[in-house]
Image: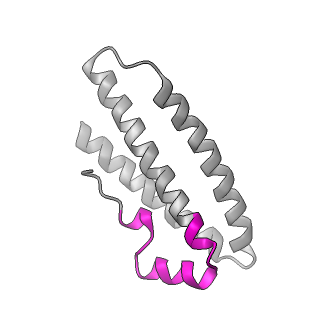
Amino acid sequence: MYHTLNGTQLRHLWEMGRRRYEDASRPGGFKVSIGRLLEELEDRIGQWELIHAHEEPSNEREEMVYELCVEWGAKVIFGMHEELELRSRGWDIYHASYIAEELAWQNVNVYS
């Protein structure tokens, strides 16, 4: 079950990243998509803090789900932050990084 959930989260992460790239690729979309990415990042940080602050799970199944939420939440937040940092250098750098598959979401490690 743990590996299945990891795989599901990874596919979701890739889909989100591709969607952000597609939005940024549209005419005028780069600047608009930066604002949306920043809003989503702020929301996700708030959600992660709530989950992380929640009391420890009481059984093994709850613990597994809790750990996956905390772990994947951190991976998503880190990747979005890295993407914002990269986007601050402009479209050409962001686009080249996407083509070279150097964006954080394109290189996430599911085993750490």
Name the side, left or right, on which 11 lies relative to 86. left
Q: Residue at x 69, y 57 (%)?
A: 36
Colour scheme of this structure image? one colour
Q: Residue at x 44, y 55 (%)?
A: 13
Image: 99 above or below 11: below
* Residue interval drawn in magenta: 84-107
Q: How many labels does the image show?
A: 0
Q: Position of residue 59 (x, y in %)?
A: 28, 16
Image: 61 above or below 85: above
Q: Position of residue 23 (x, y in %)?
A: 64, 68
Image: 62 above or below 23: above
- Dominant SS of magenta comes to helix
**Residue 100 is drawn in which quadrant?**
bottom left
Q: Residue at x 54, y 34 (%)?
A: 49
User: Can residue 98 be found in the magenta stretch?
Assistant: yes
Q: Position of residue 99 (x, y in %)?
A: 45, 82
Quarter of the image for the N terminus: give it: top left
Q: Nearer the viewer, residue 103 or 7?
A: 103
Name the side, left or right, on which 92 lies relative to 1. right
Q: Nearer the viewer, residue 109 or 82?
A: 82
Q: Nearer the viewer, residue 46 or 9?
A: 46
Name the side, left or right, on which 81 lies relative to 7. right
Q: Residue at x 48, y 22 (%)?
A: 54
User: Can residue 19 be found in the magenta stretch?
Assistant: no
Q: Where is residue 94 in the image (x, y as percent from the top left)?
A: 55, 77
